[in-house]
Amino acid sequence: MIDPTLILVLVGIVSIACQFLAHKVRLPAILFLLLAGILLGPITNTFTADDLFGDLLFPIVSLAVAIILFEGALTLKINDISGHGKMVRNLCSVGVLVTWLVVTPAAYFILDIPLGLAALLGAIVTVTGPTVIVPMLRTVRPTAKIGNILRWEGIIIDPVGALFAVLVFEFILTQQNAVSHTIFAFGKTLLSGFALGAISGYLLGLALRHSIVPHYLQNTAVLTVILAAFAVSNFLAHESGLLTVTVAGMILANMKNVDVSDILDFKETLSVLLISGLFILLATRMNVDAVMSVGMGAVLIVLIVIFIARPLSVFISGVGVDITVKEKLLLSWIAPRGIVAAAVSALFALKLESTNYPQADVLVPMVFIIIISTVVLQSLTAAKIAKALNLRLPAANGFLLFGGSQFARELAQELKKNEIPVILADTNWDTISAARMANTDTYFGNPMSEHAQRELDLSSVASVLVLSPYRQINPLIQVHFEDQLGKDATVLSLAQNNSDETERHQVSKAYAKKLTLFDSFVTYAYLANAMSKGAQLKTTAITETFTFEQYVQQYKNNLVPLLYINDKSVGVFTADNTLNIQAGCKVLSLILTDET
């Protein structure tokens, strides 16, 4: 066997390569992670997770899945369920039940597996998740209504579906006992999971609210306590730990005056690390014989999941909801399965195999086949279907403004007046609050965070303007969005005044060349000073009788051109561009006062 150290390094390298490839081709990373694991495992027989970890595989997978479920539950706030429309609420409740009721009998009869295993498969495939939905939405660019429904369905159904799958799993495990013990064992599992989860979540919330734990220890302390709760719960009631961590995360997320943003960022980073390595390792255990044994049955189940279960759940969930048939059709087509489905299926399979549950080895191959099929098929076709249904947005022309100064807020207002999509992001609540009072779309937080990856809708964004005074984070924002939005996007930052800084504090020459937004003299301080002295933003139409040259001459030195708008396309003035502004364009400028 290959040296275990080399195998671990290989898994790390392959996982990073998969994440990088997924980012470049705009597809969910889980697809490449699973394919890489299958290639390393059953296809080439390089190694398997069992060879590498032996008896430690089960506890390692258990703890990893516990962290993934806890991180997912931290994102589930009750207000989100009620605050994002009846359709989202129905999809995450009625829709889950409909999918389960369709897939369960189909799997039971077509795959000829025990009813309990079929019910578990049906529960697992109810989950989509933001990690697969968000990359797809960026490519598809559906209308805002559809995009919001799909995004919030993915966020909310992640922990809801996981909790449902855990409950089904606990029930089928207890069913292996005599009937008289089944209700007792299941009740004990539910009691332990809900009680210990609620207690541990509430106590953690109190500790965070009152700053009992030092800030630098909070992430580590929360992780340790959650894993301890997981272990204790399993000790009190067999396999109730997953229920405990899910409930704990939901309690913590919904407690008042408890900020879980730092914890969520930490757990997200940890989850990415776990997911990347975990899925490669789990996929190496794929049983080719089990896949072959289901044969055409697997194809039929995939077709039922895509063409019967999902459309039924959407159309039933849409009863009494203000949503068109075309919108229901598009919602019916976009439902790729994701990380939670893969993680819990692998863990449940390990547990069922350890109890000699019949045909347990079918579970993982079937879930992986459904994941790969839905991700590939829907990623390749969803944009075309959205366009055919006339539900695809035109090419992105919107702006993300980082920084919530008075200038940025008024720029956002001018863009809105010209029907240009705009989002204002900042880490300062006061500026975000002021922008919201002006009815501007906002994102409160770090737009580079994993939280932003899920919740910040960039489908309409083609340009990022860095307008903040945060010199430490501005270069990171620039690099991040240059990479994320691609070479066709416009990502620009304001100039900086380095005359008063020592050499060690000045920006690099390479970065300085990118600080060309608007003009070489337009710094954050310049804009703040101008706004304080009464400068205004104004959009002016250029015509045959009023040329751009005449426009500039009219204001002379009291004009700073910012953007030009030609129909719905928008360009940005910079220090080094020479623009030929023709009749029919509009120019958005900063009009200075004589005092400036």
Image (spheres, rainbow, N blue to C red):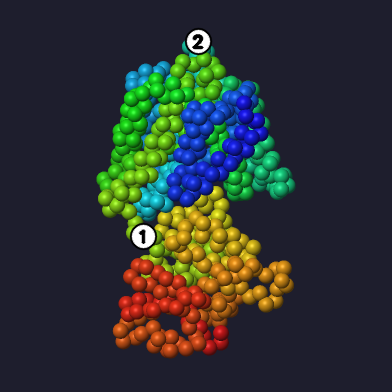
The N terminus, quarter of image:
top right
Q: In the figure, 96 relative to 184: above or below? A: below
Q: Where does label 1 land, which residue?
A: 395
The picture places residue 399, in percent across and down from the top left corner, at: 45, 64
The picture places residue 117, in percent across and down from the top left corner, at: 44, 21
The picture places residue 400, in percent across and down from the top left corner, at: 48, 62
Q: Amino acid at mark 1?
A: Ala
Label 1 packing within 10 angstroms: few (<14), some (14-19), many (20+) = few
Q: Residue at x 30, y 33 (%)?
A: 308
Q: Quadrant of residue 50?
A: top right
Q: Secondary structure at mark 1?
A: loop
Mark 1 to mark 2 CA distance (whole Å): 61 Å
Q: Is residue 581 left or right of residue 229?
A: left
Q: Quadrant of residue 306?
A: top left
Q: Which mark is residue 178?
A: 2
The first of marks 1 and 2 along the sequence is 2
Q: In the figure, 314 relative to 435: above or below? A: above
